[in-house]
Image (cartoon, grey):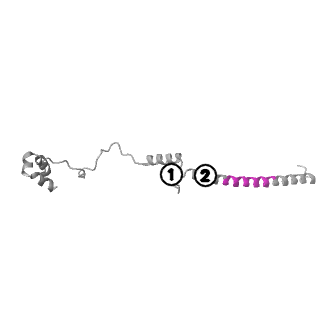
């Protein structure tokens, strides 16, 4: 059996009390370190958020943003635009009539008048004035 004399027990109690104090001090130090770490992480998150800001997600005008921020914004804009599929044919849907210009018909009234308006017989007959006055 271990020697349980009062002096040995008192020494163990004193050692235990000292160890408890050391543990309490270490717990307090650990809590302070955790609180400091949380503050640093919050500051880091805020700085990262501010670093990621540009004119699209802040009140800063585009003329005031840095060159790097403008380049990142433009690169993101270019990357987000949808690309046309390589398999698709150009043009509209089948059966839809376009609204482009129609080709000129050579037999139209104005084309005939232009061809005949400057002939010597047309000038003599006075039809040139009538053709150009109608327009």
Find residue 47 and report its horizontal and vertical position in percent: 61, 52
Q: Tag on residue 90?
A: none
Upstream in the sequence, badge 1 or badge 2?
A: 2
Q: Are marks 1 and 2 in contact (CB under 8 Å)?
A: no
For the point 58% across and 52% down, the residue is: 50
Residue at position x 73%, y 54% in the image: 32
Closer to the camera in the image, 32 or 62: 62
Q: Quadrant of the C terminus?
A: bottom left
Spatial CA distance of label 1 from label 2 is 22 Å
Residue 69 in the figure: left or right of residue 16 = left
| Residue 84 in picture, x, y percent from top left | 36, 45
Q: Which mark is residue 63?
A: 1
Q: Element type at marker 1?
A: helix
* Extreme residue toward the top, this view: 86
Magenta part of the chain: 22-39
Q: 78 or 88: which is nearer to us?
A: 78
Where does the image place residue 51, in percent across and percent down from the top left?
A: 57, 50
Residue 102 lies within the magenta run = no
Dot in front, 1 or 2: 1
Horizontal arrangement in the rendering, residue 30 relative to residue 80 (left or right)? right
Look at the magenta stretch and give its main secondary structure: helix
Q: Is residue 46 visible?
A: yes
Work out whether residue 22 or residue 46 is closer to the camera in this orientation and state it. Answer: 46
| 28 part of magenta stretch | yes
Q: Residue furthest front?
A: 124
Category of crowding for the residue at label 2, using alpha-carbon neighbours closer than 10 angstroms: few (below 14), some (14–19), many (at least 20): few
Residue 99 location, x and y as percent?
25, 52
Q: With respect to residue 17, does 119 lie above or below?
A: above
Find numbered disc 2 in the image and state the secondary structure of the residue it sits on: helix
What residue is pinned by disc 2?
A: 47
């Amino acid at each position: 059996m271990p020697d349980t004399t009062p002096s040995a027990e008192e020494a163990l109690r004193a050692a235990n009390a000292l160890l408890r104090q050391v543990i309490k001090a270490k717990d307090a130090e650990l809590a302070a370190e955790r609180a400091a770490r949380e503050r640093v992480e919050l500051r880091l998150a805020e700085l990262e958020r501010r670093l990621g800001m540009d004119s699209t997600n802040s009140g800063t005008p585009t003329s005031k943003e840095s060159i790097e921020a403008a380049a990142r914004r433009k690169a993101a804009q270019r990357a987000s635009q949808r690309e046309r599929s390589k398999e698709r044919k150009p043009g509209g849907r089948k059966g839809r009539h376009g609204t482009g210009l129609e080709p000129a018909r050579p037999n139209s009234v104005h084309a005939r008048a232009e061809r005949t308006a400057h002939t010597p017989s047309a000038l003599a007959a006075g039809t040139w004035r009538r053709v150009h006055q109608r327009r």
